[in-house]
Amino acid sequence: MSVHQTILDKINLKAPGDIFFPTEFRMLGTDDAIKMALSRLVKENKIERLAHGIYYIPKFHDLIGAVKPSLEMIANAIASRDHIQIKSTGISALNKLGLSEQVPTRHVYITNGQPRTYHVAENEIHFKSASPKKLALKGPISSLIILAMDEMGQSEFDETLANKIKVLLQNEDPTLLENDMMLAPSWIAKELLSIISKS
């Protein structure tokens, strides 16, 4: 059986919307043969190329048509492939928390892996190295808040943002919040303590 057919058989087992990488097929042939097979499958509309070395199974919705994976889904798929940890930061974190309506074209994540940038259409996924302390943040809400505030800087922090954060923190596990406040930069810990004490 050809490399092309073997890869197609494996791809047919995947679900629409699944993200995958050429490395999954390494045991089936040479890198060049795999690359050629994937290129042919793209031309046959069996798969789509999201970025260099990143593919997905086309997914369609009856009303909106083609549904492509979000940048967050792609970032998480890369992290899973590389067995690394990632966390949203900056505008991506603010957007995820609903603290900003700005839709970032550059999604930034801190990681314990190698710093890298992936170009996806007009957007970028950027992995940047971070200290173990930042990666030790545990709260699904408080970690995003701390990373967003850290990226934003103290000068950008205001009363409006503080009031929004106050509401969000009410949904965080107190134990995880306590853990994250101990790891936060001093000015952020001070601001969060002030917000909590007003609750």
Image (cartoon, rainbow, N blue to C red):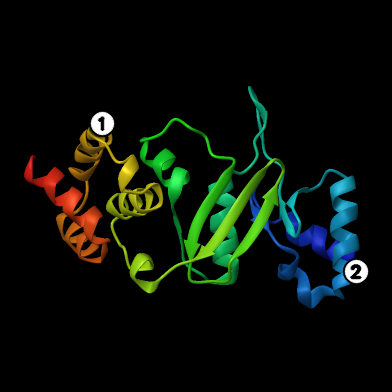
Label 1 Cα neighbours within 10 Å, binned few <14 / some 14-19 / many ≥20: few
Please name which of the two marks, 2 or 1, marks the residue nearer to the observer.
1
Q: Quarter of the image holding residue 66?
A: top right
- The reply to whether residue 17 is visible in this rendering is no
**Amino acid on which disc 2 is placed:** Ala
Q: Which mark is residue 191?
A: none
Give the residue pinned by disc 2.
33
Task: For the residues labelled 2 and 1, say whether their Cβ atoms are less than 8 Å apart.
Answer: no
Q: Is residue 193 left or right of residue 104?
A: left
Location of residue 102 with respect to 83 vertically, above or below: above
Report the residue at 85% width, 67% height from top: 34
Q: Quadrant of the C terminus?
A: top left
The answer to which of 23 and 79 lies nearer the viewer is 79
Q: Earlier in the sequence, mark 2 or mark 1?
A: 2
Q: Is residue 86 left or right of residue 39?
A: left
Q: Quadrant of the N terminus?
A: bottom right
Report the residue at 64% width, 49% height from top: 15
